[in-house]
Amino acid sequence: LFPPPLRLPHANALLPDLLPALRRLEAEIAPDRNASTTITVNRHAQFRPHTDSGAGAGQSSSLIVAIGDFDGGEVMVEGQMHPIRYSPLQFDGWKQTHWTKPFSGERYSLVWYTPQGLDKASEALDAGQGWPEVQELVAALPPLVPPNELPRFAQRRFEQTTGPITTQEFSMVPPSVNFRSRFTRLAITRLQEVANATNLLLPAPTPTNEGPLGFQGRVLFDSDASPEQFALLEEGVESVRAVLLHRDLDSTLGAPEIAEWLVQEIDWPGALQKWERFGNRPPGGDKEFGVHVRCKRSLGRIPPGTVQDLRLALARKLWSEFGWEPKVQRSEACFEVQLAFNSDGVLVEAPLLVQRNARLEPKSPL
């Protein structure tokens, strides 16, 4: 449950048996705790240092536990490490900085809490009232955040995020998707020599030995090079992009749910700052800032017909949250968001430098 005017999570209807099971689990592992109204389920999520800043502009203490077959994945709270694999932990997620240690394997984390303004709903659950009655109680509450202030409220939440959840910060598109070709190998070598590329993630070979395609023919990497050093790559590199997110994806979600998830997970203000650091500028100032969303489906990762719906849903969501005007034509936008789906999940990028006349130049001005 969330306080009005926020709506009920879509997962309530998608997974009707999960909510009662999670409520019983909370009562079992924390019998002295007041019943929580809101439960978050994370899969393979590694969060950077942050404090919670979601619905209600405040919340009760958080109860977290991790399940699954994995190594690592401890939760750090104010610098203190807490193993939470089948070991519940309570802390103040609203005030205490916390993050996730790296892990390997399959990891789910379950988080229980009650947003500010839902105290009566929590008391009703403790008193034994059913979930439908409690939903009606919450629906009758006055809005905690006026609807006309909701986009601004949401934007303040995102500004507290330190960065996207991903393993590599940049991606490079080589001149050929054949990663065995001499030109592509040369481009990767120059990437390491000129841009100090480290932690490279290359596509895996295909069984047919026809040259790997990998994640849409990308090389993912980290680098501490300056934009000026990147520009020296010149020929052999089609474009350099910022990796905004590289994550697994629940393929059962529809376009609105995926768009909502992407807006929540990605540090969009941080992405815009990086785009500007590489010399990109809106041609007419902030009032003419337009965004174009591209989306490519691969290997049936998302259902047919979802691509166009997702483009529209994400563009509209970015407009409502940040005021970035959607642009249908790629040539009319100064900021571009590219989504690619395959067996690895979803890769979200923002082009920073593109090849023009054998030179890497800023993506904008147009």
Image: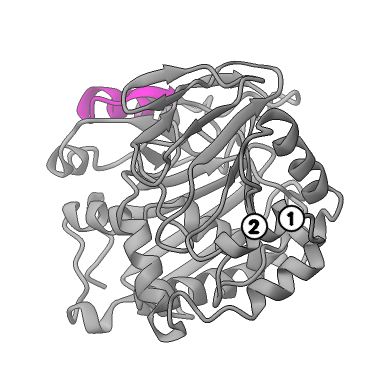
Q: Amino acid at mark 1?
A: Ala
**Are there few (<14), some (14-19), or many (20+) residues within 10 Å of tag 2?**
some
Which residue is pictured at 35% across the width and 47% down the height? 242
Q: CA distance from mark 1 to mark 2?
A: 6 Å
Image quadrant where one finds the N terminus: bottom right
Q: Which mark is residue 127?
A: 1
Q: Amino acid at mark 2?
A: Glu
Range of magenta residues? 187-200
- Rendered residue at 33%/23% (across/down): 189
Front residue (pair 180, 278): 278
Is the C-beta separation of discs 1 and 2 under 8 Å?
yes
Farthest front residue in view: 127
The percent coordinates of residue 211 (x first, y second) are 62, 29
The mark total stands at 2
Q: Position of residue 253 (x, y in %)?
A: 73, 57
Q: On the picture, is 151 further left or further right than 2?
A: left
Q: Residue at x 63, y 27 (%)?
A: 66
- Which residue occupies the foreground of this view, 215 or 182? 215
